[in-house]
Amino acid sequence: MGCSRTVERVSGAIGDLREAPARFENIADVTNGGVLWSLPSLLANGLLRYSEELFSLPKGFYGLIHIFLLLTFMALARIKTPEQLRYTPAGEWGKLLGLDRIPEVRTLRGKIKIISQRDQVRQWSEKLSRDWLRGEPDVAGILYVDGHVRVYHGSKTKLPRRYVARERLRLRGTTDYWVNDQQGRPFFVINTPFTPGLVKMLREEIVPRLKRDVPGQPSESELGQNPHLWRFTLVFDREGYSPDFFVEMWQKHRIACITYHKYPKQDWAACEFLDYVVATPYGNVKMKLAERGIFLSKRIWLREIRKLTQSGHQTSILSTDYVSETAQIGVNMFSRWSQENFFKYMLQHFELDRLISYKTEAISDTKMVVNPAYRKLEGKIKSKAGKLGRKKKELGEIVLSEELSPKEIQRYERKKGNLIEEIVFIQRDIERLKDERKKTPQHLKWEDLPESEHFSQLAPARRQFMDTIKMIAYRAETAMAIILKQKLARLDDARSLVREIFATDADLIPNEQEGTLTVCLHHLSNRISDEAARHLAHQLNATETQFPGTKIRLIYKLVSD
C-alpha cells in the first residue's frame, strides 16, 4: 500500500519518533503535483504561522506540518472530505509531502480531532485574521459583512429554522457572518446556531473585534478635530438597515455605514443623475448617480445616493461617510457582488456548507436567546401586515365608472364595503398582536426556554478549524490568480488556470548537493496557459520558499524549460 519507510513507522508507533522528516525522491508524473505550486502563497497567508505555538500532536509518523499541508492541498485539489481520500492514490499524495504515503481516513480524522481544541483554534483564527487585516491596511478600511446560512440536514439536533434565500425556504441550520474585503477575500467568520440578526451580531461581536484589529484607525484627538472623520467603513445589505444602529455607530464609535435604503421615497428626476467613471480593482466602472441629504427618522443626517439603471430603476444607498466622493460610495456599495461571488465560489469549489463532524455540544444555561413566543408573534404581525397591504391595494384599484348600471354600482358598493370591513378587522388584529408582543419578553435565558425548544449546538472547534483552512486556501488561490491575471484577460480565466495547475501532474527532481527540489509542471491545455504559468513560476521562484520543516528550496518550472 505504499508504506516503504517501515523503520520510521515502527518508531512512530512506539513513540520514539517525533515526526517523519520529509525526503523527496526523483519521480515523474506525480498526480496533482501542481498543488506544490501553491506552497509559497499558502505560507505567505499564514498556514503554518503560530501552528507550533498553539497546536501539538503526540509523537508519531505524521506531524503538524504533514496534516496542515495535506488539508490545504486537499482543499485546493477539490478533495472536499477526508472520506474522498479513499479514492485517491495515497502513495502519490505522500510524495508531495516528502513521505511514502498519506494517512488513512481514520488516522487523519483522529489527528484533526486532537488539533481542534476550541480555545487554540479560536486563537489561531483570530491571530491570522489580525495579520491579514494589518498586512493590507489599504483594503481593511472598507469591510463587507454578510450572513450565510449553513443548512443542517442531520438528525442529531433540531436547530432553529431560518430563511435561506438561495433555497427560498425556511430550513434548519446555523448562520455564518463573514467579514471580507472589497475583492471578496475573507478576514474572519463568526458562526452562531441562534438567530440574532445582522444588527445584533455587528453590535456585539463584529464591531468590537474590528475596533481592536483594524489598522490605521485615527486617534481620539484626530477624531475630535475632524467631526467627519471615521475609523473604518462597514458595508452590508438591507438586513442591517436600522436608523438606531446608524446613530449608534456614528455617534458612539465613529464608524461609517453604507447600505441600501429599505424604504426609499418617490423616484428622483432623471436630470439629477450624472455620469461617473470610477477605477476599481476589476477595471473602470461607469454609473449614473445622483445625491441628496436625508434626515432619517429625525435623528441623523445621511447621504442618499441613487443609481439609475438603463431600465430606469433607481437603487437608493444611504451612507454616513461624509467625506468620500459620490462615485466612490457608489462603487463601495455595489462591490458587494464580490462577497456574493465569494459565497457562490466557496459553495461550488470548497464545499462551504459541508460538516467535518456531527458531534454536538450543550449550550450554556445563561445564554440569552430569542423568545420563541416573541418570534411567533413577529411572524403573525408580518403576515397580517402583508395581507393588509394587499387588501388596501385591492381597495385602491376599484374604480367607479359613470357607465355602470344600478346593479353594478350596488355590487361595487358591496365589494368596497366588504374590503373596508376586512381592512378594519385586520388592523384590529395587528393592534392586538402588537399589544401582546409588548408584554412578551424578546429574549430569554436558555434555561427558561420550554423544553420542546431546546437544541444542541454543533461542535464549533472542528468547523472553525476547517473554515480557517479553507480561508487560507482561498486567499492563496486568489493571490496566484492575481499574478496570472497580468498575462490573461479576466480574473475568471486566471482562477480557471489556477485550478488547472493544481490538477496537473508534475515531476519532482531533488538535488541534495544544492539543497533544492524542482517541481516540473507538465504542459497545460494551450500555449497562452503555458506562458502565464511561466510568469507565475518566475514570481514564485523569487520568494525562495523552503519546504516546511526542511532547508530544501523549491524551484518551479515547466517540464520543457
Image: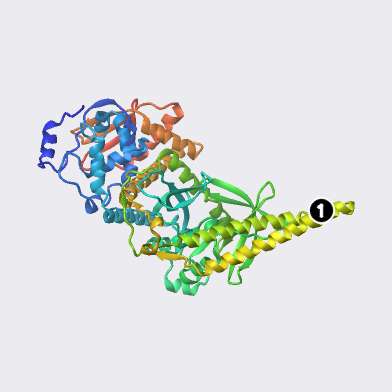
Quarter the N terminus occupies: top left
248, above or below 192, in the image: below
465, above or below 495, in the image: below
Corner quadrant of residue 304: bottom right
- Label 1: which residue? 411
Q: Nearer the viewer, residue 123 or 65?
A: 123
Which amino acid does the dot numbered 1 rest on? Arg
Q: Element at badge 1?
A: helix
Q: Position of residue 154 (x, y in %)?
A: 38, 44
Q: Position of residue 26 (x, y in %)?
A: 23, 27
Quarter the C terminus occupies: top left
What residue lies at 55% left-to-right and 54% top-to-bottom?
333
Q: Nearer the viewer, residue 132 or 69?
A: 69
Q: Nearer the viewer, residue 446 or 468?
A: 446
Q: Is residue 487 visible?
A: no
Corner quadrant of residue 318: bottom right
Relative placement, left or right, of 493 versus 390 is: left
Corner quadrant of residue 297: bottom right
Q: Position of residue 271 (x, y in %)?
A: 73, 56
What residue lies at 68% left-to-right and 46% top-to-bottom?
310
Mark 1 crowdedness (10 Å alpha carbons): few <14, some 14-19, many ≥20: few
Relative placement, left or right, of 274 versus 525 is: right
Count of numbered tags: 1
Name the colouring of the figure.
Answer: rainbow
Relative placement, left or right, of 328 versus 525 is: right
Q: Position of residue 499 (x, y in %)?
A: 41, 34
Q: Is residue 490 visible?
A: yes
444, above or below 455, in the image: below
